[in-house]
Structure formats: structure tokens, C-alpha cells
Image (spheres, rainbow, N blue to C red):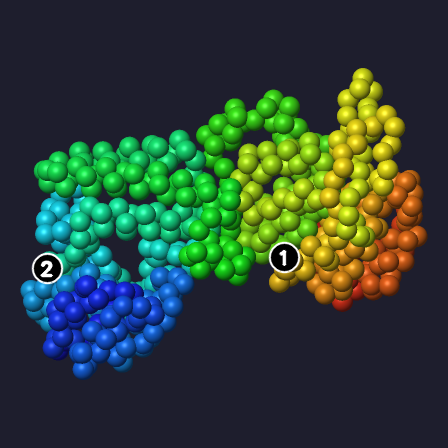
Amino acid sequence: MARPKISVVIIGKNEERNVTDCLKSVDGWADQIVFVDDFSTDRTVELVNQFSRVKVVQRAMEQEGRHRNFGAAQADHDWIMILDCDERATPELLAEIDTLFDTRDDRAVAFWVPRKNYIGDYWLRHGGWYPAPHMKLYNRKFFRWKESVYDVVHPGMEFTQPGYIQGPNLSNHLIHHNYKNVEDFIRKTNRLTTLDGIKWYLDGRNMGMGRAFRRTVDRFLRRYVRKEGWKDGYYGFITAVLSGFYELAAYSKLREIRQRGYYLKEYGITDEMLADAPLFAEPSRWRKFMTALRATPKSWKTAWRNVQGKRCEAEVEILGHLAGPEGVCVDAGGAYGRTMYALAKSARRGRVLGFEPVRFNMSVLKQIKAIFLLNNVTLHKLALGRESGKIYAVSPLKPKGKVGYALSYLSPKVIPNTECERVDMVTLDGFLEEKPLDRLDVLICDTEGSELAVLQGAAQTIDKFRPAVMASVEDYRLQRCGDNQAGVAQFFRDKKYGFYSLQDGRLTAVQELKAEANYFFLPEEKSADIVARLNPPPAA
């Protein structure tokens, strides 16, 4: 069988040092060369244009898999050979590809090619650096790169149709001038560890200091001892050390991203990408144990009791189903975190914005976020109300002098025999003007009496997004803030919302609000779908 026509696709940015030799290695053999330039600022494009048979297209690379698929789509032929600018195809490899199709299984549509990796002019023969095959030849009709939003580097690959397989690895190799010198090795490691840190953050990777350290040691021993990197002498040792350090560096950057949000904007991670990513991972038993050791006994006891215990209100149990996996939720008055936990665990690819003004309650929420790895939660130490300004968060005293932080409420003045804390208050409308959302699916109001004030301060947001609302509207608590249930009912009637309560495990429409219940308020245009989705089917 004659060799089919092959398009060579090369991607690169600022590769004037490498691109000429790369193109020369396939010029005259390839039926077409496509160069995808990531808006280089050096002489890369000028040098590429010196080759008359090269098609140049420009595109900013925001995700590697999508970028490679774009390059393949620009080619005229279905068989694609993918190269990086620091790779060179050897004549022996090209000759092997020419004869490959004579004996190829018709189902084999992707082939891996060995690579000789160099640091400077030294070929790394051991330590796992050779043969280290990579997928380099494939048919784009049946095979593609994955475009997962969190695969910002090292994307996976997939067959697009059933019945096709990976062919055998080729015998001849590419030359890969991976690193110019040790400085270049460290520079590339710095960049790739940042990208891997971002990738781990976006896919909710379970990674802690202990695991990162174990992986660091294991990677060094694997390269230097098990894969005989010691046979490469000085370079074998240096590359093994730096390869081990890779894991610790990537974890350190993951930690900075989690705590401070570093690197995301610099590497083009958009709010859309963050919204599409899980950002949530179930913690391992080891992580739970170590986090529990760092937690104070009181905060750990409180976290477990309120998140996993039996004291939770029945309405909280259906919040996860209400939010959905991509939901965006606002939790006003998070207190001890049960609603926050339920929303975050369900909205794995979504976001939860928690608002809690009381210092102690905020410390508990932060502990819960750390213990259960709620990476899709953003906490704000703010009170929500009908206007911006300052207000007192009042925590009543319980018997034996204990402070009832879970019962904290807002007051314009100091209340005797309570613990009062001066806090900042904003409206949800004003907050979202500065930090806008694309959607809002669920709004929780459990603020011990100021629920109507929160709702009035969120009136524009409710009109815009029409979220489902769960609110505690106990009359005696509303009255201490100058409001009442009738005001809440009128607010939702004006917004064309229906009233629902949970009765025998089912959402049931009600006409009036009673004194003691939590209620769900659903927009009339969505209520039928929401109720049908949340209510279990009746027993046969």
C-alpha cells in the first residue's frame, strides 16, 4: 500500500533558535507543513516564511489540546505528523514511516515514536529519558487530543470512533533538543510546574505537603536508581534531582493558587474556565486525618457535627439537588457551614459565594473549607443587607456564659448582655456590580431576622437571574429587625415567585407563610420543572 499524504503540523512561539532545523528535517518529505504560531515576537515567522511550502496560521494557545486540534484542522490531509520546534525527524524515521503502511493493521490509526532527549549536546540514555515514546503520527478522522478545560498542559488523547487501536511503537526515533543547558532545564521546569499547579487546581487534585514530598522522593529514586540514571553521570544526577523537585515545586504553586489566586490571570485562566472546572475533590482519608490534627478540637467537633451530624435541618438535604453540578450559589449567613457544604459538594463545577460577618463563624467556615477541600467556595467576611455601611453583629449569651454564635443577628446598635462585633455590610446588588456573575441559581438567606433586608438589597440580582431562594422567615426574628413575614410574602409576590415548604420529604406549594418554617421561593416560570426534578416519584 502506498504511503498516504501526510501533513506535518508544528506549533511554536518565539522559537527562532529551533524552528529552522525542525523545518529542514521534514522539508521535501512532508506533503504539507502547517506552522501554528502563537503570536511570536521574535523572528520565528520570518524564518518559517523562508520555506515556500509552509502554511502559516496564527492563534493564541489557551489550552494545548485545543491548540493541537486546531493545527490538525488546518491541514489538507488526514494523516498528521505532529512536531515541536525543538524536535528533528531523522531520515531513518521518515523512511520507516514510508514503509509503515505496507504492513499496517487497518485499525491502527495512531503511532508512538521514540525520542532521543538531549541536554546540551549530551544524549540522556537512562533515567527514563529514552526511548520515552510520544504519540507523533495519527489519523485525525479517528484520533484527537482531549480539550478538557483543566488540561492546560500535557493533554490526553482519545479515539473518536470505536474499533480503532494504537499501532506498535516505531523503531526509529526523533531527536529532541529538550534543554539547551541546566539553566534552560530550570527555566522550563519553572514554567511547567506552574502549568501543572494550575492543572491540579482546575481538576480538583488531592495534593498535600506529605504527598508532594513522597512523590518528590519517589520520582528521584525512580529516575536515578530504578531506571539507572546514575549511568549518565553528572547529568543523570542533576536531571533526577530536578525531576524530583518538579513535584514539590508544582505543589507549592498549587498551594499559592488555592490561598492567594496567583498565576491564574498571568497564564490566561478565564472566569469561564474556572466555572467549567470541578475545583472540588473528595479528600483522602490521610488528608482528613492530617487536617483534623491541625484543627482545634472545638472547630473539628463543630465542623463534623454541623456538616455530617444529625442536627441538620431537613431542607438542607435537598439543596445539592437544587444547585446542580454547574450551579452558582450565594449563601448569606453561613454560620457553621451545613448549607455551604451541601451546595459546594453538589456544584462541583460551579461556585459558592459565602457571606458571614461574625469572626468566629468565619473561622469555622474556613476550617470546614480546608477539612473537606471545598475549593469551589469563596468566603467573604461581610454582612448582606438593604444598604451598605457599618452594623453590629450581635451574638447572644447562652446559659453558663457561652456565646451563641450560630444565633448571631444584625443590629444598628449595641445590645446589652451580648457579644457585639462591628462589621461591614454591603448589598448583594452592589457586591455583584464589582464582581459580576454570569448566572445565579440558588440564594440562601438564613440571617436570623434580616432576611428581608438581604432580599431587598438583592432585588436587581433576583430580577436578573431569577434564582431559587431558600429563606428562614420566622416572624419573631424578623420583628427584631423591624420586618415581618407579611413583608417577605409581599416581596416575593411582587417578583412573581411561588411559596413552597418541605412536607414529608416533598416540596409542596403553600399559600401562606407560617411562623416557624423554612421556605423555598421559586420563580413561577421555573417552579414546575424544579418541583418535578426535586420531588421523588410517588410510591407505587
x%, y% of residue 97?
13, 68
Q: Is residue 212 left or right of residue 451?
A: left
> Relative to residue 5, is residue 332 depicted above or below?
above
Q: Which label lies toward us, 1 or 2?
A: 1
Name the residue that disc number 1 marks.
Answer: 435
Q: Closer to the camera, 25 or 472?
A: 25
Q: Is residue 454 visible?
A: no
Name the residue that disc number 2 marks.
Answer: 172
Q: Is residue 57 left or right of residue 515?
A: left
Which residue sits at x=41%, y=63%? 62
Q: Is residue 295 visible?
A: yes
Q: Kindly indicate the quadrant of the structure image that contains residue 296.
A: top right
Which residue sits at x=23%, y=50%? 184
x%, y% of residue 466?
73, 62
How many marks can you see? 2
> Relative to residue 528, is residue 141 depicted above or below?
below
Q: Quadrant of the N terminus?
A: bottom left
Amino acid type, label 2: Asn
Q: Secondary structure at mark 1?
A: loop
Furthest residue toward bottom: 52
x%, y% of residue 223?
20, 39
